[in-house]
Amino acid sequence: MRKNRNSIFNCLIKILAILLFILLIIMQENNNLNNDFYPTSFYKIKNYTKNNNNYLLKNTVEESQYLKAIYPKLDIFSVTTTSTIELHTIVKNFVPSFSIFKLYLYDDNELIDEVEIKTITNSVNYLFNNLKSNHYYKIIVETINTPMFHSYNINGLTDSVIIKTKNEFDTTIFSNPSGYAISKKVNIIYNSGQIKNPIYMFNGSESIINNNVVYKCSNLSDIVCNEKIDIGTKLEKDVWYKTTQKTELLLESNGTIKTKIYDGKNFVNMKSLTINNIDKTAPTMSDFTILSKTKNSITIKAVGSDNESGITRYQFSIDYGTIWTNAQESSEYTFDNLTHESYNIMVRVINGTFINNGQNNINTTESNVKNIKIEN
């Protein structure tokens, strides 16, 4: 008998401890509500109807005020391909025991898919497939949530997003060389997919020379592009030109190339590329100092400056610039095995375009000549 009484007593103690634990959780939730409360509202989509083969969503709105409520937040993000939308939905600031997510997929005003997902978590992932490429879709998300331990009730949340699938037919546009250069080529390869009779177009924000025949557009509303421009012509800035499916341009200054395709009704597949690191300005200064002299050698150090691509190479001459040393990265050079009393020394500084363009008159600045005597 005594053992049975002890067993019953132990069970009561355990039940009391469980009830006390639940009470503490409820008190904590109520305390959270009291610390952060404000009136909120939500909008619930109740139903939809089908009329003339178009699904029209009846935005029947229920607006309710919940005082002293921490309002959950509905977050939606997506990952797209050319034919799919992977939707990720989460209800933040919410501890659920049961939730229903309803997803509505619209193409214009037509409801093309509807999904209901029941879960005991506060998030769902869903993949819509067999979609059109380069196309806008609207997705409406509705949640019906039952909170755990909360002293208030949240019936539902609603939000919507506009998502565009990726373009299956994409124009390729790239420049070369990389790094600093005196000029750069831009290659454009248009991809119009299944568009019939596409019109390929481009314009540039700065100086461009065309490496293939193009046609200047005088009227974009009616797509009038009749003026023929021969190869090697410097084109006008911010003017649209009609071109071929593969186009090569030459840029002589930094700028942006824009492209688009006319499909007979609209401009599609619009892209742009900004080209930088074109330097057509010579170094601003070139000089040298004498580091040391002996009876048969002179060691000098070249100095120079370039505000764009910097100084990357140096050359040295001991005979008034008749013969120059090979371009080198070091700014110091020693002339040795000298036999004359004095020498007419000069230096060259070459900017960062040397890597792509070598030494030339555009990227090089020479110092003044200095007559330097060796030690006796």
Image (spheres, rainbow, N blue to C red):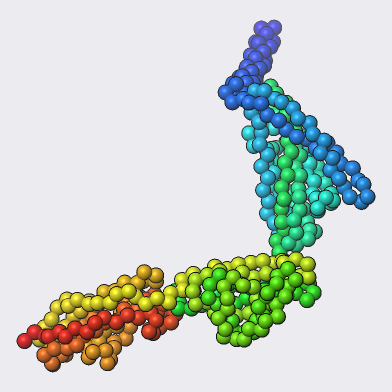
Image quadrant of residue 200? Answer: bottom right
Foreground residue, 59 or 292?
59
Most foreground residue, 374 or 224: 224
Which residue is depicted at the point 59% across and 70% down?
238
Q: Residue 319, percent across and down?
A: 22, 91
- Residue drawn where x is 62% and y is 76% of the image: 188
Q: Residue furthest right?
A: 52
**Which residue does the image show at 66% across and 26% down from the upper left?**
39
Quadrant of the frame with the N terminus: top right
Q: Is residue 253 visible in the rendered structure shown here?
A: yes
Nearest the eye: 181 or 298: 181
What x and y, as percent, mark residue 370?
19, 83
Q: Please give left or right for residue 341 compared with residue 312 in the image.
A: left
Q: Position of residue 180 (x, y in %)?
A: 44, 74
The correct choice, above or below, for 211 with respect to 40 in the image is: below
Q: Is residue 146 left or right of residue 27?
A: right
**Residue 367 at x, y = what percent?**
26, 81
**Residue, x 68% and y 54% (percent of image)?**
79
Work out whether 307 lies above or below 137: below
Quarter of the C terminus within the rendering: bottom left
Hey, which residue is sitting farthest top in the picture? 1
Q: How many marks?
A: 0
In this picture, is 339 found above or below 170?
A: below
User: From this viewpoint, is residue 3 visible?
Assistant: no
